[in-house]
């Protein structure tokens, strides 16, 4: 009896996301051969845990090209595939969407206090920043001041870079004591005395 091959059935959009993230990490890839179809083969063998149907990858790849997210250029006998500006934006949003702060088993005794002051002309950045802070588990201390109990410096730096915010606009402090508000935050983050 022949063994059946099992393929990961992901929605078409999920395969496109994987392609964008893969190219965001790789930068650009150069494929030798007579056609850029080899990218599909390369992508299909990139992660052995994920087995995609060849046709699904091909469809996602060409949909991304038509949407202007990928550019395929012929250079001699090779093809170079890379993200366009639009593709980089999409990949950036996908990376930012995947951000999360890891909760450690043992609290390290430090609070991370984020303060921001974004000009009114860039209000949209302020609104996006607030929504991501909530998704990352930050809690509002007072207007434009947020608190987290776990290490989050890297995640904040990614957010700042993505939104084009400076260290003058967003500051992250590490403190040992939150004063009279500490008990409220200990309860919120389930941290015992």
Image (spheres, rainbow, N blue to C red):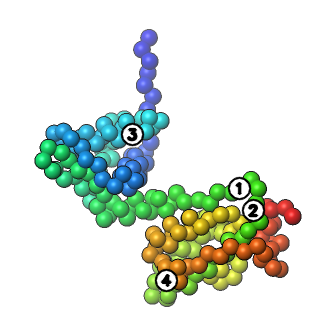
Q: Residues within 10 Å of mark 3 (few under 14, many from 20)?
A: few
State how far apart marks 3 and 1 are (Cα): 31 Å
Looking at the rendered structure, the secondary structure element under dot 3 is: helix
Tags 3 and 1 touching, CB below 8 Å: no
Looking at the rendered structure, the secondary structure element under dot 4 is: helix
Is residue 188 at least partly visible in the picture?
no
State how far apart marks 2 and 4 are (Cα): 34 Å
Q: Which residue is mark 1?
A: 104
Who is closer to the viewer here, 189 or 149? 149
Tags 1 and 2 touching, CB below 8 Å: yes
Residue 155, how many percent across, how many down?
Answer: 56, 64
Q: Residues within 10 Å of mark 4 (few under 14, many from 20)?
A: few
Q: Residue furthest left?
A: 76
State how far apart marks 4 and 1 are (Cα): 33 Å
Q: Which residue is mark 4?
A: 123
Number of marks in picture: 4
Q: Residue at left 60%, top 70%?
A: 133
Q: Which residue is mark 3?
A: 46
Q: Which residue is mark 2?
A: 108
Q: Residue at left 77%, top 66%?
A: 109
Residue 144, how many percent across, how many down?
Answer: 62, 82
């Amino acid at each position: 009896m022949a063994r059946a091959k099992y393929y990961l059935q992901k929605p078409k959009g999920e395969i496109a996301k994987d392609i964008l993230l893969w190219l965001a990490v790789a930068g650009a890839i150069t494929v030798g051969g007579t056609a850029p179809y080899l990218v599909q083969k390369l992508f299909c063998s990139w992660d052995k845990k994920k087995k995609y149907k060849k046709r699904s990858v091909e469809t996602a790849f060409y949909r991304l090209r038509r949407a202007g997210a990928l550019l395929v250029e012929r250079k001699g006998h090779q093809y170079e595939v890379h993200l366009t500006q639009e593709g980089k934006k999409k990949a950036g949003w996908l990376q930012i969407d995947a951000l999360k702060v890891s909760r450690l088993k043992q609290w390290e005794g430090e609070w991370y206090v984020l303060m921001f002051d974004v000009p009114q002309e860039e209000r949209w950045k302020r609104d996006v920043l607030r929504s991501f802070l909530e998704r990352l588990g930050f809690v509002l201390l007072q207007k434009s001041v947020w608190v987290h109990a776990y290490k989050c410096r890297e995640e904040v730096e990614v957010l700042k870079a993505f939104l084009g915010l400076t260290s003058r606009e967003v500051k992250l402090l590490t403190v040992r004591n939150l004063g009279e508000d500490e008990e409220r935050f200990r309860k919120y983050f389930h941290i015992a005395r």
